[in-house]
Amino acid sequence: QQQVKQSPQSLIVQKGGISIINCAYENTAFDYFPWYQQFPGKGPALLIAIRPDVSEKKEGRFTISFNKSAKQFSLHIMDSQPGDSATYFCAAMGGTGTASKLTFGTGTRLQVTL
Amino acid sequence: DAGVTQSPTHLIKTRGQQVTLRCSPISGHKSVSWYQQVLGQGPQFIFQYYEKEERGRGNFPDRFSARQFPNYSSELNVNALLLGDSALYLCASSLGQLNQPQHFGDGTRLSIL
């Protein structure tokens, strides 16, 4: 019940296009959903996050869409740029206990081509 | 402002040895969490510490231990190293204990020969 499923595993998008990455979760106690961007040799960097009381959050070219009833959320990257080429992880946090642990998806390797 | 800093950046050990990894959180952050990231996978939760107390432990053997110091820095110790312990070990810090944004360092790359 702690799983977060992420798709696709890899994604190739042309410069200027829209990149879409999807995640689904099972644990209804999750109440914080961040997205992280990771470049090779670096740690994950917090990109954008949402809580389930809103259905959409936008920061610059990055938008999270959240569907509580379907237990799904997605990341949209508008006007994708070669510098966006990285691995993206969705994650979820919340639930029982006294710890705040992030449960991560399996990652999506995004390549933005010229 | 400095982000989360981890040391060392790379480490090579042999099976059976022990290792200590270090983490300094963002200034003002009181919680530190440790994650293991195996190549090609998402990070897996190991521990969370808040105000020097363990607040959570992931599904890792007792060979893994950690502690947090009064200045909120933290150490992760792994004993009796196995080949399968080869991974990127990530430290994340957050302001508080529950459901706060976690910010990661660049990790320690541990290789076991």
Image (cartoon, grey):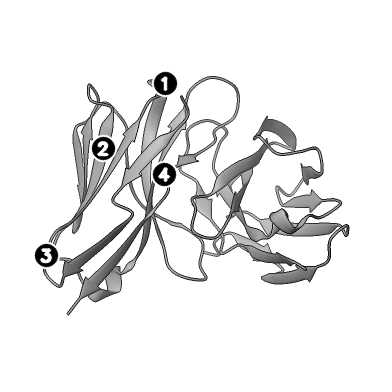
* Label 2: which secondary element: strand
Instruction: Identify the mark at residue A73; answer none if there is no mark.
Output: 2
**Apparent side of residue B23 relative to residue A17 in the rendered image (left or right):** right
Report how far apart the C-alphas of labels 2 and 3 lie in the structure.
20 Å
**Apparent side of residue A98 relative to residue B78 in the rendered image (left or right):** left
Instruction: Give x and y (percent) for residue A108.
Output: 34, 55
Residue under pointer 4: A105
Residue under pointer 1: A29
Instruction: Identify the mark at residue A74; answer none if there is no mark.
Output: none
* Label 1: which secondary element: loop
Residue B2 appears in the rendering = yes
Report how far apart the C-alphas of labels 4 and 3 lie in the structure.
23 Å
Q: Which class describes the residues within 10 Å of circle 3: few (<14), some (14-19), or many (20+)? A: some
Identify which amino acid the numbered label 1 is placed on. Ala
In which image quadrant can residue A3 be found? top left
Report how far apart the C-alphas of labels 2 and 4 lie in the structure.
12 Å
Which residue shows up at 66% across the image and 35% down it? B59
